[in-house]
């Protein structure tokens, strides 16, 4: 079934594993991640960022996911990094079962207000909500500063907003890491000790398996992967085109890109689910 994020994450929290949240960009990456879920029999969250929706249309990805989902383990369709109430509303209308409202760049009180408002709207529609407190590096990193999530503030934020999950800043970054990242695993333990809300790790592409396992042990229950899957798609595509430079039918060379996405997703799923 296609279920809410809350449903998947509460099971993951009880089972002490993490649900992989896999970003998709096109039909091929949707096919790839769904095949990985089918092959492993594990639940995944399939998610899109607003820029992907700008690229392909707000309702396009949820329609593709719904059309291609073949049953088996439950999945969730999630909006990653929703920047406004409006985009969250649109995604809810288009069949998303979970949305993220990212008010992390706002002052605390404004973040609380925006997130609580979106949580009310989403909950009324039976959709779950992820908020964010603290900053995640990479694209969000405006002045080279990462502010780690304060555990007490996280507790207050969760209580006042009613979010179903919370993305935390613990030293991860979006995109490709320059050098070895330092992840404050202790901070995850401290946050998890003060709030029952499932915690989300962004920017996991490029972290070692060991760091990811440590983060899950510390209390992370959803882990986002985008860059790794984009790299896999592009590598598969490049290889297919290099092997057959005369190919012109996308259906002839895209299957290799799908296969690369699927294989990357299977590896991620096994890592998150502790296989
Ligand atoms: Zn993120």
Image: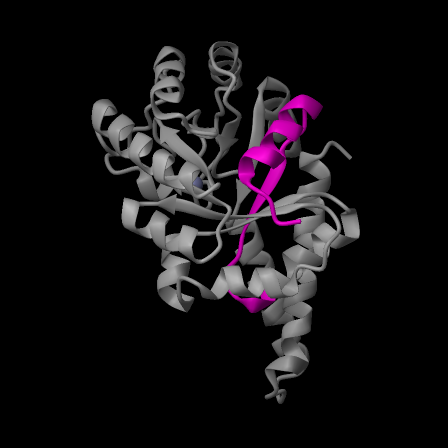
- 34 or 238, which is in the foreground? 34
Image coordinates for residue 1, horizontal then vertical, percent: 67, 49
Q: Is residue 230 magenta?
A: no
Q: At x 51% / y 59%, what residue is drawn?
A: 62
Compared across the picture, whether 204 is left or right of 79 comes to right
The answer to whether residue 179 is left or right of residue 148 is right
Which residue sits at x=71%, y=49%? 266
Asked if residue 250 lies left or right of residue 164, the reply is right
Whole-percent x and y of residue 3? 60, 44
Total labels: the figure holds: 0
Which quarter of the picture shows residue 85? top left
* Vertical placement of residue 255 versus 59, above or below: below
Stretch of the chain drawn in magenta: 1-29
Identity of the residue furthest to the front in this view: 124
Q: Is 35 rendered above or below residue 176?
A: below
Which residue is at a point 35% across and 34% down the rendered structure image?
120
Q: Reply above or below: 190 against 148.
A: above
Q: Give me the residue at 55% from left, 38% from top.
A: 5
Quadrant for the C terminus in the image:
top right
Which quadrant of the structure image shows residue 238?
Answer: bottom right
On screen, 78 above or below 195?
below
Front in this rendered view, residue 162 or 176: 162
Q: Residue 192: percent from the left, percent from the top?
A: 52, 15
């Amino acid at each position: 079934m296609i279920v809410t994020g809350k449903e998947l994450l509460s099971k993951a929290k009880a089972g002490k594993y993490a649900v992989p949240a896999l970003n998709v960009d096109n039909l091929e990456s949707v096919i790839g991640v769904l095949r990985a879920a089918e092959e492993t029999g594990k639940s995944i969250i399939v998610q899109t960022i607003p820029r992907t929706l700008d690229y392909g249309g707000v309702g396009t990805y949820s329609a593709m996911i719904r059309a291609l989902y073949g049953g088996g383990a439950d999945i969730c369709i999630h909006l990653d990094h929703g920047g406004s109430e409006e985009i969250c509303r649109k995604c809810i209308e288009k069949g998303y079962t979970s949305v993220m409202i990212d008010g992390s760049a706002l002052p605390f009180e404004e973040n609380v207000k925006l997130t609580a408002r979106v949580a009310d709207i989403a909950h009324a529609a039976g959709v779950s909500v992820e908020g964010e407190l603290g900053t995640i590096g990479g694209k969000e990193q405006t002045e080279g500063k990462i502010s780690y999530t304060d555990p007490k503030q996280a507790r207050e934020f969760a209580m006042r907003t009613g979010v179903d999950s919370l993305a935390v800043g613990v030293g991860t970054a979006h995109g490709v890491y320059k050098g070895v990242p330092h992840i404050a695993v202790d901070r995850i333990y401290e946050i998890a000790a003060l709030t029952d809300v499932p915690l989300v790790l962004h920017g996991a592409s490029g972290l070692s398996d060991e760091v990811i396992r440590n983060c899950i042990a510390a209390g992370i229950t959803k882990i986002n992967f985008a860059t790794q899957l984009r790299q896999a798609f592009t590598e598969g595509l490049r290889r297919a085109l290099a092997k057959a430079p005369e190919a012109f039918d996308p259906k002839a060379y895209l299957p290799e890109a799908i296969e690369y996405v699927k294989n990357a997703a299977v590896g991620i799923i096994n890592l998150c689910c502790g296989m």
